[in-house]
Image (tube, rainbow, N blue to C red):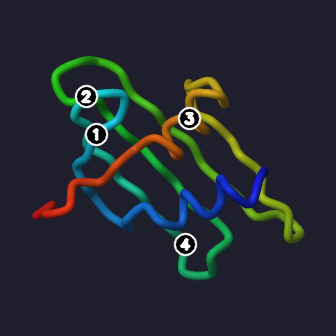
Amino acid sequence: MSEQFLTALAKLPTGYSRGSYCGGSWGVTVERSGDGRRAKLYGEALGSDDHVSFNLYCVAGEPRLKPCETPAAKVIDFVFGFEPALNDG
């Protein structure tokens, strides 16, 4: 798991937010454990059935990406490409 991926994931807001990815509108929920050892992301394209979902676990100091019914390449592309809306309320 690259440091760039972890940095991009850390920049995504915790909780629900809306934003854009590949020209479409998305709703995304990011959950993080209090101890920082787990992150979970679920995103849905608004107006279509496209989605992205994964868990990230830190095991023995090493991050492990576990995509959920989503190819790892799509997960990585999504984290780098998702742009949260500035005034999400």
> Which residue lies under the disc numbered 3?
77
Of residues 68 and 25, the one nearer the viewer is: 25
First reached walking from the N terminus: tag 2 or tag 4: 2
Q: What element carries label 1?
A: strand
Q: What residue type is labelled 1?
A: Ser
First reached walking from the N terminus: tag 3 or tag 1: 1
Q: How many residues crowd mark 2 within 10 Å: few (<14), some (14–19), many (20+)?
A: few
- State the residue lying farthest toward the top: 49
- State the residue lying farthest toward the bottom: 35
Mark 1–mark 2 CB contact (< 8 Å): yes
Residue 44: horizontal and vertical position, in percent?
A: 31, 33
Question: What residue is shown at x 56% (from left), y 35% (from top)?
Answer: 77
> Which residue lies under the disc numbered 2?
24
Rendered image quadrant of residue 71: top right
Report the Cα–Cα distance between label 3 and label 1.
13 Å
> Which residue lies under the disc numbered 4?
33
First reached walking from the N terminus: tag 4 or tag 3: 4
Q: Which amino acid does label 3 sit on?
A: Asp
Report the Cα–Cα distance between label 4 and label 1.
25 Å
Q: How many residues crowd mark 4 within 10 Å: few (<14), some (14–19), many (20+)?
A: few
Question: What residue is shown at x 35% (from left), y 53% (from top)?
Answer: 29
Residue 5: horizontal and vertical position, in percent?
A: 65, 53
Question: What residue is shown at x 19% (from left), y 30% (from top)?
Answer: 46
Q: What residue type is labelled 4?
A: Ser
First reached walking from the N terminus: tag 4 or tag 1: 1
Mark number displayed over residue 20: 1
Q: Which amino acid does label 2 sit on?
A: Gly
Residue 28, above or below 32: above
Report the Cα–Cα distance between label 1 and label 2.
5 Å
Labels 2, 4: front one: 2
Judged left or right of residue 76, residue 21 is left
How many numbered markers are drawn?
A: 4
